Amino acid sequence: MLKFITNLGRGALMGSAEVVPGVSGGTLALIVGIYQMLINSIADLVLSVRQLVGLAPGKASTKTAVSTFKSLPWRLLIPVAIGMGAAVILGAKLIEPLLDEQPIAMKALFFGLVIAGTYVPAHMVTKVGGWSSSFVLLGLISAVFVFFLTGLPQGNVADPSLIVVFFWASIAICALVLPGVSGSFLLLTVGMYDPTIAAVNDRNFTYLIVFALGAILGLAIFVSLLKWLLENRARVTLVIITGLMLGSLRALWPWQGPERELLAPTDQIGIALLLFIAGAAFVTILLALERKFGETEEQKDLLET
């Protein structure tokens, strides 16, 4: 029961992150220690479906597909999925209005959370070969790319067609499993964030079903590639993830203008500093608990690749 509640909380953290433009659910999965297990599980789920419909490479049967399906860690996946779904629904009602009413305070909180969480992939790089000058450069390039991406002006799409909804859902879902790249921020940039949040709040099931179908397609394509990279190119992948997380901090800088230009701190500096410390402290405590009780199995697997 305790593990179920813990995994429920992990999913809730990931779902809450997806509502906040600039924060990636993948970042939270990495921080709470279930990132690679989720990637592997989703990839295996996709494989079992492909085996079932005869699209998997090589010989596959219904029996093989069922075996793959049964081997998935459902005791982790089910509570995480429930927690994520509940957090997205509640977050659309609670977090999104707070971002509108208290943008400086909320961004400061998540800025502290993400900057502290960057320690996770950066530290893992030191375990799989370390930071050479070329890898530092690669990390900086990744950071600059996301820094530029998060500086693009916000788009505006009042009534998107279902084809557009499907397309952007398939792209944005990739950010769910890629730390440092925020799916909600990407939707905000292309003008799809407001109609998507409105669809959740208004229970527009046609919109939500099309969005879900696009997300499933995007996830099925991207997650297999990401799994291969983590298993075969762990060092490079972790370096890029570190850079992506650092670059994404631009989106969370508390003081920004209407066109996302960065401004110097002016008001609410005290509360912003306190919430920044609170966010960083929260992640630090999570990481300390992880060290106390040992590395997660999925992190051990990563370090052995």
Image: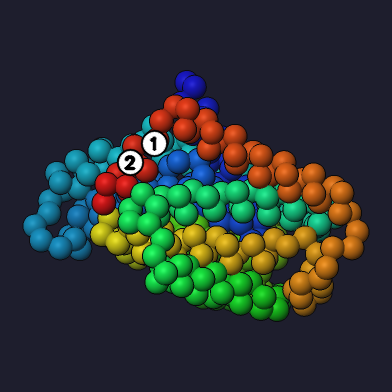
Q: Is residue 148 above or below residue 274?
A: below
Crowding near the residue tagged with mark 1, few <14, some 14–19, many ≥20 C-alpha atoms within 10 Å? some
In the rendered image, residue 51, in percent from the top left (x then y), is placed at 20, 55
Q: Is residue 293 above or below residue 256?
A: above
Q: Give the numbered dot on residue 273.
A: none
Real-space Cα separation, disc 1 to disc 2, in angstroms: 6 Å
Asked whether the beta carbons under mark 1 and mark 2 sit within 8 Å of each other, the answer is yes
In the rendered image, residue 243, in percent from the top left (x then y), is placed at 51, 65
Q: Residue at x 70, y 75 (%)?
A: 154
Q: Which residue is mark 1?
A: 296
Q: How is the image coloured?
A: rainbow
Pick whichever, 10 or 298, lies toward us: 298
Q: Which residue is mark 2?
A: 300
**SS at mark 2?**
helix
In the rendered image, residue 246, in percent from the top left (x then y), is placed at 57, 62
**SS at mark 1?**
loop
Side of 292 where 74 appears, left or right: left
Q: Amino acid at mark 2?
A: Lys
Side of 216 where 229 appears, left or right: left
